[in-house]
Structure formats: structure tokens, C-alpha cells
Image (cartoon, rainbow, N blue to C red):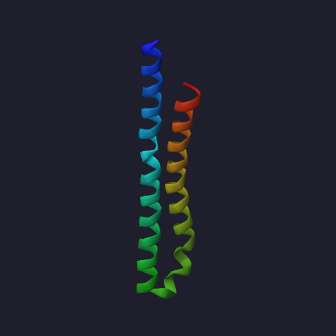
Amino acid sequence: MELIAAAALGKYIGAGLACIGLGGAAMGVGNVAGNFLAGALRNPSAAAGQTATLFIGIAFAEALGIFAFLVALLLMFAV
């Protein structure tokens, strides 16, 4: 009985550790947006040309967060 409880505890600890990636994704999005804003304030005429790059960078950073969330869900419900 104790082995089953330890396995369940390990599953939840692993899911919690996998959620650290969500915080990393949040920091990544903040970094991308902050650097875009700093560049746009320095050269406002070039900001319109960099908007697509901003959205691509945000999408990649958010994708890593979604993958971390998916791993956490898999650890909690599929393992």
C-alpha cells in the first residue's frame, strides 16, 4: 500500500516540476515583448516592420509553456 502512495506522490511532484516551464514561458514572453518595446521606443518608424517578429517570438515562447503544461497533464492523468 505504501508503494502505491509513494508512486502517486512522485507523480504529483513530477507534474509540479514540469509546471516550472510555465514560469519560464512567462519570462520568455516578457523578455520578447520588453525588447520589442525598447526597440520600438528607440526607433518608432521601424516598429511596424518588427511586429510580425514579435508575434512569432511570443508564439514560440508560449508553445514551450503549452508543452510543459501538456507534460504535467500527462504525468497526472496518463501515468
Give the image location of residue 55, x and y in percent.
Answer: 56, 66
Q: Quadrant of residue 16?
A: top left
Q: Indicate the quadrant containing the C terminus: top left, top right, bottom left or bottom right.
A: top right
> What residue is rendered at 40% in x and 85% in y?
42
Give coordinates of residue 40: x percent, y percent: 46, 81
User: Is 58 rendered above or below residue 49?
Assistant: above
Counting the numbered discs, the total is 0
The front one of 7 and 24 is 7
- Where residue 41 sits, quadrant-wise, is bottom left
x, y (%) of residue 36? Answer: 46, 74
Residue shown at 42%/14% (left/top)?
Answer: 2
Camera-side residue: 48 or 75? 75
Q: Position of residue 45 (x, y in %)?
A: 51, 87
User: Which residue is located at x 56 percent, y 40 percent?
Assistant: 70
Residue farthest top in this picture: 1
Q: Is residue 67 above or below residue 30?
A: above
39 in relation to 74, above or below = below
Question: In the figure, 13 relative to 27: above or below?
Answer: above
